Image (tube, rainbow, N blue to C red):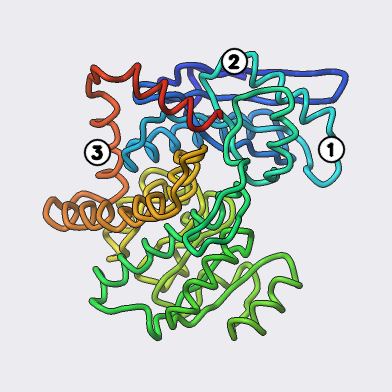
Amino acid sequence: MSVFSHKHFANHENVHFHHDKKSGLKAIVAVHNTHLGPALGGCRMFPYATDEDALSDVLKLSRGMSYKSAMANLALGGGKSVIIGDPRTHKTPALLHAMGDFLQSLGGQYIAAEDSGTSVPDLQEMGNKTAYVAGILNKVDINGNTISGDPSPATAYGVYIGIKTAVAFKYKSNLEGVRVAIQGLGNVGMYLAQHLYDAGALLTVCDLDESKLNMAKLRWKANVVRLNEIFSCDVDVFAPCAMGGAINDDSLAFLKAKIIAGAANNQLAEVRHDQTLMKKGILYAPDYVINAGGIIDVSYEGPDYSATIARKHIENISDTLNEIFERSKQTGLPTKSLANQISEERMSVTNTTRSKKIAGALKRVAS
């Protein structure tokens, strides 16, 4: 299995492989870029069919985290970790402790947070062995309620802000009566659906979990469709909130929505689909821009956490998207390409206060 010549290797600084025979842990940590600060990114657990699939996922996701932090103006770099295994059957305290030991051995170059297949309690379990986990502390939201470190609500709020921004740019309207198809009702998808329903949007949803679909029908009067029907629904916005690669040659042949704005990472199956979307007149909100709410919220975690300040920062996603949309309109360049360009510019700038930013970021997210 090649790393340096891998098609998703993008000048990553480090790629670490780890196997703990006793617990059965098989994990990969990819650190893409730490120019702006220590790499922060989720720890995903998934039963990958092959080791190659796991490597591809962690390389793509870690690069996206670098871009995400840069576009969100955070003093953080980009990294990601994957645990190979079924979270429903392979996850044990021993495995999580072994993952914590692995993270600790990296000395803080990578800080893990919750992701698909892991939860706040899982990260807390890892935290028994390492200081380098984030998104695990209880905090007080803007309404005075105590909430867990789960970044899903913040991610969903950022995606909601992004959808509002895209609809306003494309249709010059608010969300009242706008038809939105949500692919996937995980933690983020559920929170997003509530925001959209409260704003007057009309929802169409799909998911593997029947109980969530029934809840969506009762709570949000959502139209429920099969997984393979979600792309062809007559809607204004398509919101991918499941695994990556939802936008591909097959789905584009059926897609009717003129806006793609969702929470999933790596929504475009191939780089060329960015250009395809533009040619079709589909406005695409780059994934790592619109779904940055979670990492923004986690970056403020610590004893001085302010929900008001974190929320205001998340709402800046709107300004970033509007800048990308306007520049795309003026230059004729696809939105994802523009976002990549801006991110790379920010990561390449020499920063004389880099050491202070790294120290501050580490203090917040690893406290």
**Disc 1 marks which amino acid?**
His
Q: Nearer the observer, disc 2 or disc 1? A: 2
Residue 95 drawn at (x, y percent): 81, 29
Q: Nearer the observer, disc 2 or disc 3? A: 2
How many C-alpha atoms fall within 10 Å of the one at disc 1: few (<14), some, or many (≥20)?
some
* Element assignment for label 1: loop
Q: Which residue is mark 2?
A: 106
Work out whether 364 lies above or below 316.
Answer: above
Kindly identify which numbered label has been placed on residue 295: none
**Disc 2 marks which amino acid?**
Leu
Residue 4 appears left or right of 211: left
Going from N to C along the chain, the mark reached first, 2 or 3, is 2
Kindly identify which numbered label has been placed on residue 342: 3
How many C-alpha atoms fall within 10 Å of the one at disc 2: few (<14), some, or many (≥20)?
few
Distance from Cα at disc 2 to Cα at disc 1? 24 Å
Distance from Cα at disc 3 to Cα at disc 1? 40 Å
Name the residue: 75% across, 34% down.
125
Give the camera-side residue of 33 and 312: 312
Distance from Cα at disc 2 to Cα at disc 3? 29 Å
Whether the residues at callouts 3 and 1 have beta carbons within 8 Å, the answer is no
Q: Which residue is mark 1?
A: 90
Give the camera-side residue of 291 and 153: 153
* Element assignment for label 3: helix
Name the residue: 41% across, 26% down.
360
